[in-house]
Amino acid sequence: MSSSFQASQPQWAEADIVMGWDNFKDEIATMYENTTLPNVIDYFKKTYGFKKTPKRWKTQLSKWGLDIKNIKKNEKLAMVRKKRGRKAENKRTQFKLRGKDIPNHKIVRFERAMPDRTSQRPRDYM
């Protein structure tokens, strides 16, 4: 007894093949660098009829390594630890993450959210 069952791809996968992400990668990267994701999504929906969910957009940006706007908790903790260590040595520190300078006011904000002992976890709101 043979079965001719074929697993079908989800509808969004078929749409990705027809209207592939890679065709728009450079334009998406440029726009995303200068504006918010909802603005990019809206532009592509209106201009190209590109209908993807925000979750799909985030997944694709992550695949391309473009998910650089948010600083992750472990990265914040590492920056605070480094800053505190260098401060004890009377050294100034400028942070760069994924090719972008991190403004000092952000580091100060991360530091305020951390307990004095950097080995502890950051507060929940981070």
Image (spheres, rainbow, N blue to C red):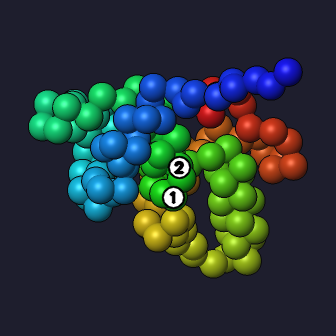
Instruction: Give x and y (percent) for residue 76.
Output: 64, 51
Q: Are marks 1 and 2 in contact (CB under 8 Å)?
A: yes
Q: Residue furthest front?
A: 1
How far across and how far down the image is residue 57, in percent? 42, 38
- Relative vertical location of residue 37 with respect to residue 85 in this rendering, above or below: above
Give the image quarter of residue 122. Answer: top right
Which one is in front, 120 or 42?
42
Write down the quadrant of residue 1 in the picture: top right
Q: Residue at x 81, y 39 (%)?
A: 121
Amino acid type of the residue that numbered disc 2 sits on in the rendered structure? Ser
97 with respect to 38 (left or right): right
Q: Which mark is residue 114?
A: none
- Residue 42 is situated, as x and y percent measured from the top left of the image, at 22, 30
Point 81% across, 50% down: residue? 118
Is residue 106 at all visible to an observer of this figure? Answer: no
Task: Tell me, for residue 62, which label it has, or none.
Answer: 2
Q: What residue did someone put label 1 on? A: 65
Q: Is residue 22 above or below residue 1?
A: below
Q: How would you rate the neighbour count of disc 1 (Cα within 10 Å): few for under 14, some for 14-19, many for 20 or more?
A: few
Q: Amino acid at mark 1?
A: Gly
Decide if residue 50 is on the left or right side of residue 77: left
The quadrant in which the C terminus is found is top right
Q: Nearer the viewer, residue 29 or 9?
A: 9
Left or right of residue 108: residue 27? left
The answer, for residue 90, to whether it is visible in the render is: yes
Secondary structure category for the residue under label 1:
loop
Element type where label 2 sits in the image: helix
